[in-house]
Image (cartoon, rainbow, N blue to C red):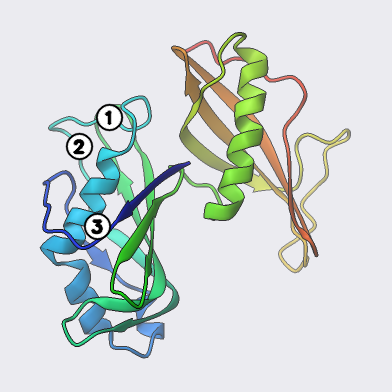
Amino acid sequence: MYFRRSARTALLAAAIAVGIQASDAGAQNTGTSQFQAFTKSEFYRGLLNRSLAGLPQTVFQRCPELVSNGSTVTIIKPVTFGADGFPNAGLWKQTFPVSGCGNDTTLHFYFSAGADEKINTVVGVPGTTLTGPTLQRDAYSHASTGAALAVKDCKTFDTKNTKFEGYGLLNLNPPTPDPGANSHDRPWWETWTMVGCGHTVDVPVDFVPDDKGTQVIVPPVVIAAGR
């Protein structure tokens, strides 16, 4: 996981272009145009680029060929604005597909606005994971432990990428098939690519939701990818 908190600042670094496709923003009652104007501001670009600067090079490569064509914004909690045009409540997610530099993936940024108009920013793990920030913390811990089984004497790993593989469970014996879209507790599995100590390890991770939360399962033996 990668976390970075940002308050109001005018910092602007031209790392990625901000293209808004706010297909979900129309559900809020505060006015889509005001929200889109904010996300196209230099201040907002600064939030994004400060967060990008916190990503380690092993996770996110930067080069002149880096391309991000547009993004998608999802309003999680309604966003409201103060008289000066800055959000003072709300929660939203912005997703950027990026390509080039040898790390084609999807970046996920989570923003929450406080009454003091400060914006907290969380950078989630990259890729196509179905998990949100809270579950990512738990999954990261399990995936790191799994990677450490494959790479002896390495204790620190970063999540380079995640890939949603499908519904059902991989690591049970026998594997559990997909119960279907109508299932209340539909399990799924992903591959988490971990990097550390010069090694890359693909860790299969099962997610088992129930009424108490979501259990994370990693097999007792993980094979190093050899990269």
Q: CA distance from mark 3 to mark 1?
A: 19 Å
Give the secondary structure at mark 2: loop
Q: In the rendered image of this protein, does residue 112 appear above or below residue 86?
A: above
Give the secondary structure at mark 3: loop
Q: Nearer the viewer, residue 135 or 200?
A: 135
Q: Nearer the viewer, residue 192 or 51?
A: 51
**Label 1: few (<14), some (14–19) or many (≥20) C-alpha neighbours in 10 Å:** some
Q: CA distance from mark 2 to mark 1?
A: 9 Å
Q: CA distance from mark 2 to mark 3?
A: 13 Å
Q: Which residue is mark 1?
A: 61
In this view, the mark in front (2 or 1)? 1
**Disc 3 marks which amino acid?**
Gly
Residue 223 visible within the image: no
Q: Residue at x 22, y 76 (%)?
A: 86
In this view, the mark in front (3 or 1)? 1
Q: Residue at x 25, y 33 (%)?
A: 100
Q: Which residue is mark 3?
A: 70
Q: Position of residue 147 (x, y in %)?
A: 61, 22
